[in-house]
Amino acid sequence: MDRTLQADRISSFEERIKEYFPKADFLPCVVHKIRNTLNKVRAKDRKRVAKDLKKM
């Protein structure tokens, strides 16, 4: 049985889960992905970009 897990990209956590579920796929946590993306956006554009990201 395949598993898809959503979690932070903590390598030790991912390695441990792979021991029990070797076929598991990891998806990054959406909240952290958005936060990391917004950190790369100019401060004056963040509100607009955040609003657009929430639509996705």
Image (cartoon, grey):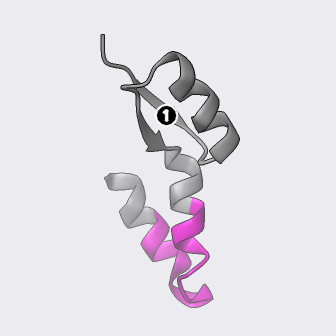
Which residue, given by chain and number where applicable, does mark 1 sit on? 6
Answer whether residue 48 is magenta in the image.
yes
Residue 43: percent from the left, percent from the top? 62, 86
Query: Which quadrant of the view contains residue 51?
Result: bottom left
**Residue drawn at the location 49% of the way across and 34% of the way down:** 6
- Would you call the spot at circle 1 few (<14 residues within 10 Å), some (14-19), or many (20 or more)? few
Query: Which quadrant of the view contains residue 39?
Result: bottom right
**Residue drawn at the location 36% of the way across and 65% of the way down:** 52
Chain part drawn in magenta: 35-50
Residue 41: percent from the left, percent from the top? 53, 83
Q: Secondary structure at mark 1?
A: strand
Residue 20: percent from the left, percent from the top? 53, 16
If the image is split into quadrants, where does the N terminus sit? top left
Type of amino acid under label 1: Gln
Query: Which quadrant of the view contains residue 38?
Result: bottom right
| SS majority, magenta | helix
Residue 1 sits above or below residue 9 on the image: above
User: Which of 50/31 is in front?
Assistant: 31
Answer whether residue 17 is magenta in the image.
no
Residue 12 sits above or below residue 5 on the image: below
User: Which of 21/27 is in front?
Assistant: 21
**Residue drawn at the location 61% of the way across and 44% of the way down:** 8
User: Which of 49/19 is in front?
Assistant: 19
Residue 47 sits above or below residue 35 on the image: below
Residue 17: percent from the left, percent from the top? 57, 25
User: Which of 35/50 is in front?
Assistant: 35
Answer with left or right where residue 17 lies relative to residue 2: right
Residue 8 sits above or below residue 47 on the image: above
| Residue at the far top in the pictured view | 1
